[in-house]
Amino acid sequence: MTAPHRIPLHPHTTAFCRSTLTAILVALALVFGTSHVLASSQATASDSSGGDWVYVDHDLAGTRYSHLQQITTKNVSQLVKACAYSFPDKEPSQTAPIVSAGRMYLTTAHYTVAVDGADCHVIWSSTWTPREHEPTNTHRGAALADGKIIRGTDDGFLLALDAKDGHTLWAKQIADPKEGFFISMPPLVHGNLIYIGPAGAETAAHGWVGAFRIRDGEQAWRFNIVPDDGEPGADTWGPDPAARKHGGGNLWTPMSFDEKKNLLYVPGGNAAPDLYDDDRPGDNLYTNSLIALDATTGHLVWYRQFVPHDVHDYDVTHVAPVFKTAINGSTRNVIASTGKDGLLRLLDRDSRDVIFSVPFTNRVNVEAPITTTPVRVCPGTLGGAGVERLRILRQAELADCPCYRLVC
């Protein structure tokens, strides 16, 4: 796709919060009226030209950009609340609505709800009752494809719900919470495959990403972000194989997709333990990396590690958007990536070179070692670019990063 010339309204402006959410605002209307843009409930993220928003990043390229023009800079001040919906659990929400054919699909850790986008009345509601221990209580979104709402759960299940009435079509446990895994990331769907992986670096799990068939949830392939014994990259973890068993590299943010090259772009998370590193000497592949996988087979095509041997919890959080742009008169196929280290990087998808790397927040003592002496470090462990504060395309909104003193 070609880079847009307009700055889009960010769909996640109010989707992420840290306080208890008592109500989610799910519909707005212009005071002088509104018009509905309806699309098929079979819509996929491959077709992003209509009014649907079926993936958390809007489309496979991760642009978070809609071509709709009803809301403009001239009338945005006239937006008023049309209706609202409150989840029964009244817990923190970290997701954005999925929208298709006038319906909005909303999710928390245990609830999936379809509401009418015009008046917020509930069309159906589905409750997930955990079948296993939940290491945490977090959820970052669902996807709509093939008439199904696809999502993960904190006890390691991958679910498919019928988008019409919400009944469960299938539920497959793909990750074991007893090993520290939980699923919080939004899945990406292309063709007949669902791409998703578990989180769990905080609970001593090791990262992987897999492809699962949309018809029944069966696994098609799996790629280990922290390599198993004998796999390429295993030697970057030092001599103790146990370091890789709890090596982190987990997923919690959206992926992106290059349809022309059939490549899945994966954001490898931070190495674990986050700060203590004596047991994991080496670069610790493929943590803190942009990973390009063959979407059909899961084979590694290329990768770029941005933060080798991380000791600051500076995981790569975003691998999007994927787009074309003109640089010095030449058209380049590029991909943007940001991390909690506070850097925006632009990579050439053909040569795989880093075109530029620029800070978008304060960076102070970013290479400082862990010490018992207080040191001012920016960004802190909460990062310069979690999904909650990703504003790299809006210079006017950038604020100083939170700064912390690391005390071991």
Image: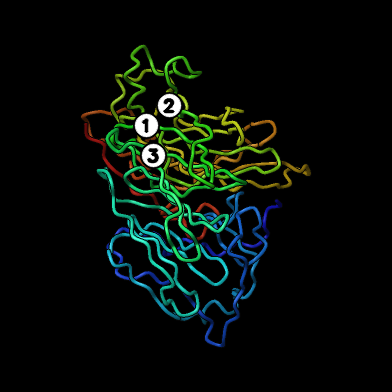
* Residue 14 at x, y percent in the picture: 42, 65
Mark 2 is surrounded, within 10 Å at the Cα level, by few (under 14), some (14 to 19) or many (20 or more) other residues, namely many
**Amino acid, disc 1:** Gly
Query: Looking at the image, is mark 2 or mark 3 earlier in the sequence?
Result: 2
Q: Nearer the viewer, residue 337 or 398?
A: 337
Give me the C-alpha separation between circle 3 and circle 1. 25 Å
Contact between marks 2 and 3 (CB within 8 A): the answer is no
The answer to whether residue 394 is seen in the rendering is no
| Residue at mark 3 | 364
Q: Disc 2 designates what residue?
A: 226
Q: Earlier along the polypeptide chain: callout 2 or callout 1?
A: 2
Residue lying at the far right in this picture: please name it: 329
Which callout, 2 or 3, points to the residue nearer the camera?
Answer: 2
Q: Quick check: 386 left or right of 274?
A: right
Query: On the rendered image, what quadrant is the C terminus found in?
Result: top left
Number of marks in picture: 3
Q: Amino acid at mark 3?
A: Val
**Which residue appears farthest toward the bottom when viewing the image?**
32
Q: Do labels 2 and 1 touch, CB within 8 Å?
A: yes
Out of 153 and 11, give the one closest to the viewer: 153
Q: List x then y, in percent, for residue 405.
A: 26, 40
Mark 2 belongs to which amino acid?
A: Val
Label 1 CA crowd tier, 10 Å (few <14, some 14–19, many 20+): many
Label 1: which secondary element = loop
Quick one: which residue is furthest to the top in this view?
239
In the picture, the disc for residue 248 is: 1
Q: Which mark is residue 271?
A: none
- Depicted 126 relative to depicted 357: above or below: below
At 36% across and 11% down in the image, what residue appears?
A: 239
Q: Residue at x 51, y 70 (%)?
A: 103
Nearer to me, 254 or 353:
254
**Toward which corner of the image does residue 43 lie, by quadrant?**
bottom right
